Image (cartoon, rainbow, N blue to C red):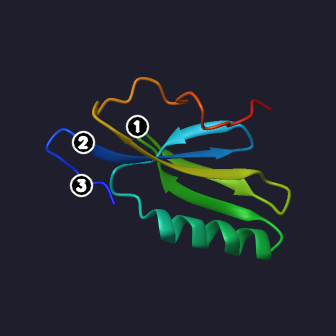
């Protein structure tokens, strides 16, 4: 496990059908994943979450492609939302 220093922070990126969002610092990632799974099991529904600068409501269906990536970095602004090497496809 990596210790979080004064200038290091963990951020989470979520990609839904190719659209990338940097989650708000207070967003509970485990709870969000549970709500996404429930939406898939229900055949589709809107899932709300806090992105870094807005509130999102995204329709999740069994055909939705969702990727969740935890990023550790030293720059709290994370100007490069799509860091190299994580392999998120463009749709």
What residue do we see at 49% from left, 30% from top? 81
Q: Which of the two marks, 2 or 1, is nearer to us in this view?
A: 2
| 47 left or right of 75 in image | right
Task: Report x, y in % for residue 55.
Answer: 47, 47
- State how far apart marks 2 and 1 are (Cα): 20 Å
60 in relation to 16, above or below: below
Going from N to C along the chain, the mark reached first, 2 or 1, is 2
Q: What residue occupies the far top of the structure in this picture?
A: 79
What residue do we see at 80% from left, 32% from top? 91
- For the residue labelled by badge 2, is the local secondary structure a helix, a strand or a loop? loop
Crowding at label 2, few (<14), some or many (≥20) Cα neighbours within 10 Å? some
Task: Report x, y in % for residue 51.
Answer: 46, 45
- State how far apart marks 3 and 1 are (Cα): 27 Å
Quadrant assignment, res 60: bottom right
Residue that mark 1 sits on: 53
Q: Which of the two marks, 2 or 3, is nearer to us in this view?
A: 3
Q: Nearer the viewer, residue 37 or 7?
A: 7
| 65 left or right of 29 in image | right
Q: Quadrant of the N terminus?
A: bottom left
Residue that mark 3 sits on: 3
Q: Nearer the viewer, residue 60 or 4?
A: 4
| 28 left or right of 25 in image | right
Task: Report x, y in % for residue 7.
Answer: 18, 38
66 in relation to 22, above or below: below
Task: Report x, y in % for residue 83.
Answer: 52, 30
- The answer to whether the residues at label 2 and label 3 have Cβ atoms under 8 Å apart is no
Residue that mark 2 sits on: 8
What residue do we see at 34% from left, 51% from top? 25
32 in relation to 87, above or below: below
- For the residue labelled by badge 1, is the local secondary structure a helix, a strand or a loop? loop
- State how far apart marks 2 and 3 are (Cα): 9 Å
């Amino acid at each position: 496990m990596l210790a979080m220093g004064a200038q290091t922070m963990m951020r989470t990126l979520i990609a839904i059908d190719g659209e990338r969002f940097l989650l708000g610092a207070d967003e509970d990632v485990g709870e969000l994943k549970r709500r996404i799974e429930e939406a898939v099991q229900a055949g589709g529904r809107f899932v709300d979450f806090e992105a870094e600068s807005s509130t999102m409501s995204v329709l999740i269906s069994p055909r939705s492609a969702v990727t969740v990536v935890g990023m550790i970095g030293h720059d709290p602004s994370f100007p490069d939302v799509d860091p190299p090497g994580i392999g998120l496809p463009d749709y």
